[in-house]
């Protein structure tokens, strides 16, 4: 004989206490996840800025490396010294910023790069100390001639966003937005240009 089991109504449903407890646990978990979103967005934005700035640096370093050294005071490399170049949100150069064809602080102007290629005795930018560059020498006594085949290249890149027109490279508050890349440009091979 088969016995029928009867299940009471009380055993089929959740109690009010169980439902309330489950909703409280879900609410705490949801608030925790939502609280992490702003930090995740900031991290993603910062990583994007660093990637674009590294791309701009590599592009400028490639241009500097392909530029002939020339003699002191008459080098095409010196055309890059203190040059400001403007970039859009993707890291693409806007127009011909070397001829100031781009209005500083325009809507498309998101990144600004400034290049310094100091020679012997010139000052370095404030973002790297602002001291005098004495040249690269093979001995530590400073009596030897500086190496004429090696120059420092300092690329400062600032994510200025909408502050392009008011951004000041020497302002201590604005200096926090500057990423500095220090590299060396090497004279490779013979320069046959006149």
Image: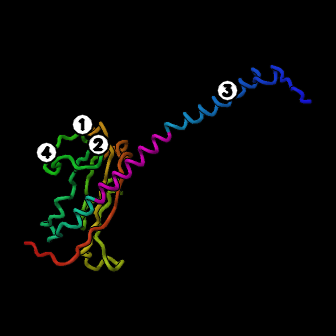
User: In the figure, residue 163 lies in which quadrant?
Assistant: top left
Q: Nearer the viewer, mark 3 or mark 4?
A: 3
Label drawn at residue 101: 4
Question: Counting residues from the N terminus, which is met first, the one under dot 2 or under dot 3?
Answer: 3
N-term mark: 2 or 4 = 4
Instruction: Check disc 3 and report its element: helix, strand or loop.
Output: helix
Q: How many marks?
A: 4
Taking the spot 32% from the left edge, 64% from the top edge, the residue there is 183
Colour setting: rainbow
Q: Are marks 1 and 2 in contact (CB under 8 Å)?
A: no
Q: Residue furthest right?
A: 1
Which region shows up in magenta?
A: 39-58
Q: Kindly report the distance in space between the C-alpha atoms of the residues bearing marks 3 and 4.
A: 60 Å
Percent across and percent down for residue 157 are: 31, 51
Q: Which residue is outermost to the front?
A: 1
Check disc 3 and report the residue beneath it. 23
Looking at the image, is mark 1 or mark 4 earlier in the sequence? 4
Q: Earlier in the sequence, mark 3 or mark 1?
A: 3
Distance, label 2 to label 3, CA atoms, is: 45 Å
- For label 2, the residue is 110
- Residue located at (27% from left, 37% from top): 166
Look at the picture and state if 34 lies above or below 43.
Answer: above
Residue pictured at 29% horizontal, 54% vertical = 56
Determine whether the residue tagged by mark 2 lies in a helix, strand or loop: loop
Q: Are marks 3 and 4 in contact (CB under 8 Å)?
A: no
Mark 2: few/some/many CA within 10 Å (<14, 14-19, 20+): many
Looking at the image, is mark 2 or mark 3 nearer the viewer?
3
Q: Which residue is mark 1?
A: 107
């Amino acid at each position: 004989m088969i016995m029928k089991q009867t299940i009471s109504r009380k055993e089929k449903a959740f109690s009010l206490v169980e439902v309330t407890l489950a909703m409280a646990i879900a609410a705490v978990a949801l608030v925790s996840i939502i609280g992490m979103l702003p930090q995740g967005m900031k991290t993603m934005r910062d990583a994007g800025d660093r990637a674009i700035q590294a791309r701009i640096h590599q592009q400028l370093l490639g241009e500097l490396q392909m530029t002939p050294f020339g003699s002191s005071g008459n080098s095409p490399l010196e055309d890059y010294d203190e040059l400001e170049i403007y970039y859009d949100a993707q890291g693409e150069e806007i127009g011909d910023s070397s001829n100031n064809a781009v209005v500083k602080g325009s809507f498309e102007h998101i990144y600004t790069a400034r290049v310094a290629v100091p020679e012997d005795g010139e000052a370095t930018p404030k973002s790297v100390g602002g001291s005098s560059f004495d040249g690269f020498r093979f001995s530590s006594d400073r009596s030897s001639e500086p190496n004429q085949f090696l120059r420092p290249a300092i690329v400062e890149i600032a994510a200025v966003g909408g502050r392009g027109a008011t951004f000041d490279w020497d302002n201590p508050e604005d200096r926090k937005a500057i990423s500095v890349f220090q590299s060396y440009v090497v004279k490779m091979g013979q320069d046959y240009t006149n």
